[in-house]
Amino acid sequence: MDISAELRQKVAGLMKEEMQRWVAAHPEATAMELEAALREGMQQVGATCLQAVLEMQETRYPKPEIECACGKQAKYMYGRTAKTLSVFGWVRYRRAYYLCPHCHTGQYPVDRRWHLRPGQASAALASLLALEGIDVSFEQASRKIAKTLLVKVSENTVRRVTQRFGALQEGAEREWQAESQDTDNLMARRRTIQDAPKRLYGALDGVKAPLKGGWCELKCGCWYEVEPRRRPRGEAVGETGSLRAKQIGYYCDLSDATGFRELVWTTAYRRKADRAAEIVFVSDGAPWIWKAVEYHFPQATQIVDWYHAAQYLNAIAQVAFEPQHSAGSAWLERARSQLWEGQITQVITTCEEQGNKPAAAEAVHKAVTYYRNNLHRMDYKRFRARGYQIGSGNVESACKQISTQRLQCAGARWKEPGARHTAKARAAWLSGDWDLLESRYAALA
C-alpha cells in the first residue's frame, strides 16, 4: 500500500504529540520501552482504522433485501456486532444481518466480502500463526506471537490454525490427484504444455515421526531441477557437489507405500513430469521407493545415492581392520574408487575378501546384498558422464526439515492427523506454496 507523504506526516504528527506525553510521564524509560510503547500505540491505531474500514460499507439505511444463494431475496433483520482477531488484536465491528425466509439462511454481506470469521483469527493473522506453528512447538509459537505481534493467542489456537493449513494442502493434493487421473485432461496437456522440464529429478525417503501410539514413518519426496555449480578444485572420489538443486518442491504423508505411491504421481503431475523429456530418481536402496518409481516411471533413470552406497564400505572397514590402520585405509580407498567408477562386480569381490573375518561377516553380507539388489542403479561413472546428480541430499534435507526439526521436537507426541497436517503445511512453506494455502484459507469464510 502506497500512502502519501502528506498523510504519513499527518499521522506521524499526531503520534508524536501522543508520544511526547508518554515520554513526559515516563522520564526513566529506555529506548526499548519507547519503541514498545510506540508499537502498542500504532497497533491501537490500526485496530481503530480496521474497524472503520469494515463498517464504512454499511450505509445508515441498509438495503431492505439482498439476493440469497438460493435465488430468492433475503430480508434485512437488524445490525449485529461481531469481533475478529486481527494482526492488530481484537477488532469489534457492526454489520447488517439478513435472513432468507425461503431457505432460512442467515448472512452477513460484510463478513462474506472480507472473508471474516467472527470470533476467530483473520486470514492475515492465521497465516502468521501457522508460519510459527510449522517452525516451533505450538506453545513456543504462542509466546513468540505475543512478543512479536503483541497479540495473545493460546497454543490450541496456533495448533488449530496450523493444522487447518495442512488440511488445506491435503485438499489441494486430492484435487491434483483427480486431475492427474482424468484421461481427457491428460490428453489436453499434451497439446497445451509448452514449458515442460527437460530433465526433472525426483527423490523419495522415509523418516520417523513420534505418534502417541509409537513411532511411525513419514514418507517424504521432492521434485527438483539442477544447475552447474563452479567448484574451486578438481573433482575427487566422492565429491558430488558440482551440481546444485533449484526449484525444489517437497511433499510428504503418513501412509503406506501404496498410498504414498499415488501422491508421488499426483505431485509429478503438478511438476509436469508426464511431459518431461527425462526423469531421474536419486534415492537410497529401500525397496518401496523403487517399486513406486517403476510403477509410475518405468523409463526413468534410477540412481542409488552415492553416499548411502559408500556407507556400506565404511561399515566394513570399521570392523574388519584395526582403527587408523594403514591396511584399512588402503582397502577403503580401493573399494571407494571401484564404487566411484561403477565397477560394482569388483566392489562385491573386494567386500567378500573381508568376509572370512568373523567381526566383518555381518557388515559384508549387508553390503553385498545391497550392491547386488541395486546393481543397475550404481553405474556412477556413466551417470557422471551424462551429467547426473548422484546424491540424494535434497530429500534427506526434506526429512530433516519436516520431521527432525519440527515433528521430533522435544516432548512431542502427535495424533496422526495433527502430525500429517503439520508436516504438510511445513512442506508447502518449504516449497514456496504458502500463497496458495493463504488464498484457500481466506476463501473458507
Image (cartoon, grey):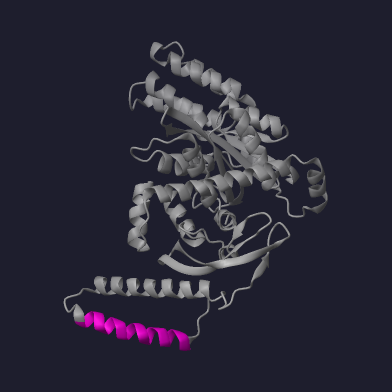
Q: Indicate yes or no whether the magenta region holds residue 399.
A: no
Measuring from the top left, give residue 149's x and y in whole percent.
38, 63
Is residue 232 in sight in this rendering? yes
* Nearer-the-camera pick, 161 or 54: 54
Image point (77%, 52%), residue name: 193
User: In the displayed structure, does residue 186 sit left or right of residue 149?
Assistant: right
* Nearer-the-camera pick, 370 or 325: 370
- Residue 175 image-quadrant placement: top right
Where 10 sits versus 268, above or below?
A: below
Measuring from the top left, give residue 12's x and y in whole percent.
38, 84
How many numbered marks are there?
0
Image point (59%, 62%), residue name: 112
Image point (59%, 42%), residue name: 389
Is residue 387 in sight in this rendering? no
Secondary structure character of the magenta stretch overall: helix
Measuring from the top left, give residue 413's x and y in whole percent.
39, 35
- Residue range (magenta): 6-24
Image point (56%, 61%), residue name: 115
* Nearer-the-camera pick, 402 or 422: 422
User: In the displayed structure, does residue 299 sit left or right of residue 184?
Assistant: left
* Nearer-the-camera pick, 365 or 296: 296
Q: On the rendered image, what quadrant is the C terminus found in?
A: bottom right
Where 380 sits versus 8, above or below?
A: above
- Residue 146 image-quadrant placement: bottom left
Measuring from the top left, give residue 242's x and y in whole percent.
55, 47
- Residue 405 image-quadrant placement: top left
Where 183 sits versus 342, above or below?
A: below
